[in-house]
Amino acid sequence: MERDGAPLSVPPLRVIFVLVFADLRFVLYYWGPIICLLGASNVFCVLIF
């Protein structure tokens, strides 16, 4: 049972970072315009656009 040499239940940190980063980017791009339209934060809009 030593095929990969590493337990499958512990993914590399790089994979976790990429997944989390992609998630955050998706949330920012999806909610960015809505938050800007609501006028919640002008600085937030400048950072995105």
Image (spheres, rainbow, N blue to C red):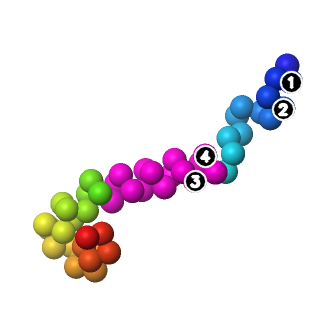
Q: Residue furthest top?
A: 1
- 26 on left or right of 18: left
Disc with the residue nearer the chain's start (4 vs 1): 1
**In the rendered structure, are the residues bearing label 3 and label 4 in contact, judged by CB atoms less than 8 Å apart?**
yes
Residue drawn at (21%, 73%), measured in percent from left and top?
Answer: 40
Residue 47 figure quarter: bottom left
Label 2: few (<14), some or many (≥20) within 10 Å? few
**In the rendered structure, are the residues bearing label 4 and label 1 in contact, judged by CB atoms less than 8 Å apart?**
no
Disc with the residue nearer the chain's start (4 vs 2): 2
> Where are the magenta residues, as a range?
14-28
**Residue under pointer 3:** 17
Label 4: few (<14), some or many (≥20) within 10 Å? few
What's under tag 1, amino acid-wise? Glu
Task: Calculate the distance from the C-alpha at mark 4 to the C-alpha at mark 2.
Answer: 17 Å
Asked if residue 40 is positioned above or below residue 6 in the image, the reply reads below
What's under tag 2, amino acid-wise? Gly
Q: What element carries label 1?
A: loop
**Residue under pointer 1:** 2
**In the rendered structure, are the residues bearing label 2 and label 1 in contact, judged by CB atoms less than 8 Å apart?**
yes
Task: Calculate the distance from the C-alpha at mark 3 to the C-alpha at mark 4.
Answer: 5 Å
Residue drawn at (42%, 56%), measured in percent from left and top?
Answer: 24
Residue 41 figure quarter: bottom left
Label 1: few (<14), some or many (≥20) within 10 Å? few
**Residue under pointer 4:** 15
Q: What element carries label 2?
A: loop
- Which image quarter is the C terminus in? bottom left
